[in-house]
Image (cartoon, grey):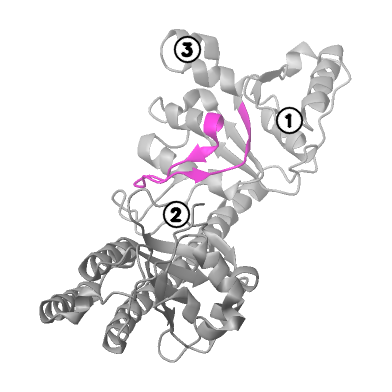
Amino acid sequence: MTQNVLPTAAPTAPPHRSLEGRLRFEALLADLSARFVNLPADQVDTVIEDAQRRVCECLDLDLSLLWQLSPDDPDTMFLTHSHLPPGFPPFPEAWDCKENFPWALERFLVGETIVLSRMTDAPAGAALDVEVVRQFGVRSLVAIPLATGGGPTFGALNFDVVREEREWPSELVARLKLVADVFANALARKRDEEALREKDARLRQTLEEVRRLRDRLQVENVYLREQLQRDDGQQRILGETQVMLKMLAQARRVAPTDTAVLITGETGTGKELVASALHAASRRRSEPLIHFNCSTLKDTLAESQLFGHRRGAFTGATENRAGLFEVADGGTVFLDEIGEMPLSIQPKLLRALQQGQIQRVGETASRRVNLRILAATNRDLTKEMAEGRFREDLYYRLAVYPIHVPPLRERRED
């Protein structure tokens, strides 16, 4: 980088020296102070950089840099806000302070402001700092540590001149410290607000998880009680005929997978028993197997049973409720009598199968679920599709691996 050549002339006086300049700068300070009062956190960064530009223009300065120390590494500082003249080469975004600015860092940490009208004014101990600064053509600067309420220094605010050397009267430095205080308080408030929002978000997430688990436990208890009223899970599938041995071999092959299975057969042939056996032999055996008879409810109530609802979603919805898909998350859902599922709900079931997402009734946000779907029917679903009562795309999602349970009349030996 081309380095500016130091002039032999004495440093020039800043515009702040004149009465008009002082009044203009005092008005700017008052305006900036008012602008930062109650400034939303998401606007702080933009307003700081605009304020840097206005200060530079008012005082005829070339650039302003605001650095912040890394909270994870106190030897590293980041350039977070800046105003640079057009065409000026950008500064690196991160610096190792001990390698580049050891003297300045020591001054900042004890709250000392650095004022250099000429680079030659710097003490011998600042030789490394001056060498780095000169690489960017800076010939005069003031650097003010950033801190709030007597707390530790967390950054620094620079105002620099590259065109010439510049005098920095004490009254001007005092005013620039006011600017630094305004910036520091705004950044601290932003940091606190962001931390509070993050804490609130974590709290909301925790409360939502608690509510979700509570809802799941409440509904799970209902489904598990219903499950106990059915088969106690100790029955075995019996059969020695060829047709039964073929069916059992199919079940053994598909059981360890997460493949969707459509179990067909007449009423009373043991389709639910096959579904229980598939779950018991799967990797999800330690998670719930939730049974749902699609013929029991219609439309909105069936949708609520499957996917849950939020309070007020419909008449009688007095509280948030998890559906069986959430209850069975990680486990298996057995949809019995799938051929009788209302056509209005079938697209939502298809979405749950395709994307692993559901929506509670009355909610717009989606929830992810990880399920295996087993379905059973005593109907001819190809006929149901032909007559428009069952979606073809849903059928092919459910019947990835079909298993037919033969009636007893076809296996009289059993």
Give the label on residue 321, or none. 2
Q: Residues within 10 Å of mark 2 (few under 14, many from 20)?
A: many
Helix, strand or loop status at disc 1:
helix
Q: Which percent across, then down, holds residue 166? A: 33, 74
Q: Which residue is mark 1?
A: 274
Range shown magenta? 353-375
Q: Which residue is mark 3?
A: 385
Q: Quadrant of residue 388?
A: top left
Helix, strand or loop status at disc 3:
helix
Look at discs 1 and 3 and give the one toward the viewer: 3
Mark positioned earlier in the residue sequence (1 or 2): 1
Nearest the eye: 170 or 12: 12
Look at discs 1 and 2 and give the one toward the viewer: 2
Q: As displayed, is residue 283 above or below residue 151? A: above
Give the residue type that dot 1 points to.
Val
Q: As displayed, is residue 269 above or below residue 159? A: above
Give the residue type that dot 2 points to.
Arg
Mark 3 to mark 2 CA distance (whole Å): 32 Å
Mark positioned earlier in the residue sequence (1 or 3): 1
Q: Which percent across, then down, holds residue 59? A: 24, 71
Q: What residue sits 50% from the left and 9% below the top?
A: 383
Q: Quadrant of residue 190?
A: bottom left
Residue 89 in sight from this viewpoint: yes
Q: Is residue 294 left or right of residue 149?
A: right
